[in-house]
Amino acid sequence: MADLQEVILEVDELEAIRLGDMLNYSHEKAALKMKISRATFGRIVNKARQKIAEGMINGNAIRISEVLPVQFKTKLNYTCNTCGYKIKVIRKNQIKNCPKCKS
């Protein structure tokens, strides 16, 4: 990975992709959520999509800007498949064994 060129997604671009593509919000609804105009949302989401496409097509690493707001750091949930225990996590693979049942 260290040898790959990077495409860096900024925080606003990541949020635009999350709202527009992952949550399937309309541009109007996503713009309201981000507290920006619909036109500005459109420019941000298009720029983000272009960066993602460039990274995928050219084999570049896609890196998320290191300055992430708190809402991104607390969005992930871990649920134990054995006991159903739930906890919020920062990273996808942060928990290897359930803190409650240790499975």
Image: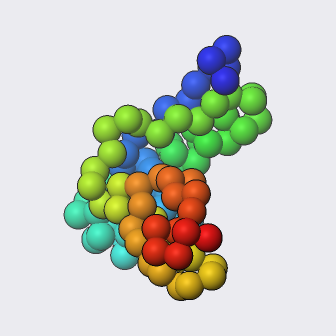
Q: How is the image coloured?
A: rainbow
Q: Where the C terminus falls, by quadrant?
A: bottom right
Q: Is residue 12 left or right of residue 78?
A: left
The outermost residue toward the left is 35
Instruction: Please tell me which residue is depicted at 53% across the width and 76% down the height of the picture.
Output: 101
In the image, residue 40 above or below residue 77: above
The outermost residue toward the bottom is 84
In the image, residue 41 above or below residue 19: above
The location of residue 65, given as percent across then percent down, is 41, 36
The location of residue 4, given as percent across then percent down, is 67, 20
Q: Where the N terminus falls, by quadrant?
A: top right
The outermost residue toward the front is 102
Instruction: Please tell me which residue is depicted at 76% across the width and 35% down the height of the picture.
Output: 57
- Is residue 58 visible to us here? yes
The location of residue 85, given as percent across then percent down, is 48, 80
The location of residue 74, given as percent across then percent down, is 35, 62
Instruction: Please tell me which residue is depicted at 41% across the width and 55% down the height of the picture.
Output: 90
In the image, residue 39 above or below residue 65: below
* Numbered-mark total: 0
In the image, residue 86 above or below residue 4: below
Task: Name the foreground residue: 70 vs 54.
Answer: 70
Which quadrant of the view contains residue 83? bottom right
Q: Is residue 29 left or right of residue 56?
A: left
Which quadrant of the view contains residue 32? bottom left
- Is residue 75 visible to us here? no
Q: Is residue 34 left or right of residue 27?
A: left
Task: Name the foreground residue: 73 vs 103.
Answer: 103
